[in-house]
Amino acid sequence: MPEEEEEEEENYESLPQISITDALESLYKLRLFEEQQVDGNKALIQQLLFHERTLLRKKVSRQQQSDIRDFFCN
């Protein structure tokens, strides 16, 4: 059993980091797909929109306005 746990941990370590931009794009595509379905799940669409807005807020909060003096410092 410990060998199985070790293998699972190794699998998690090898996963690539997903950027906020990539996650937003994926959420958008999934939401668009669901919206195009004849029997699209409105609750799922609302949840996807919620997560898109949450990630957008996070993305904006991470962006920092740089000071003009930063361009002139060596």
Image: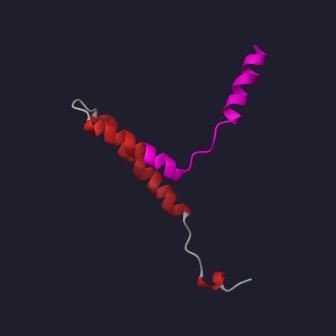
Q: Residue furthest left?
A: 38
Q: Residue furthest right?
A: 2
Q: Residue furthest top?
A: 1
Question: Relative to 45, does residue 6 appear above or below in the rendering?
Answer: above
**Residue 37: quadrant of the picture:** top left
Determine the residue positioned at 44% across, 51% down. 54
Determine the residue positioned at 72% across, 28% down. 9
Work out whether residue 64 or residue 10 is closer to the camera in this orientation and state it.
Answer: 10
* Magenta stretch, residue numbers: 1-26
Work out whether residue 41 or residue 10 is closer to the camera in this orientation and state it.
Answer: 10
x and y percentages locating residue 29 in the rendered image: 38, 43
Determine the residue positioned at 58% across, 76% down. 66
Q: Is residue 45 left or right of residue 14?
A: left
Question: Relative to 45, does residue 60 appear above or below in the rendering?
Answer: below
Question: Relative to 69, does residue 54 appear above or below in the rendering?
Answer: above
Q: Is residue 63 left or right of residue 32?
A: right
Q: How many marks can you see?
A: 0
x and y percentages locating residue 34 in the rendered image: 31, 36
Determine the residue positioned at 26% across, 38% down. 36
x and y percentages locating residue 57 in the rendered image: 46, 57
x and y percentages locating residue 24 in the rendered image: 45, 49
- Picture colour scheme: secondary structure
Quarter of the figure with the C terminus: bottom right
Question: Does the stretch in magenta take in 15?
Answer: yes
**Residue 65: quadrant of the picture:** bottom right
Work out whether residue 27 or residue 65 is closer to the camera in this orientation and state it.
Answer: 27
Q: Main secondary structure of the magenta part?
A: helix
Quarter of the figure with the N terminus: top right
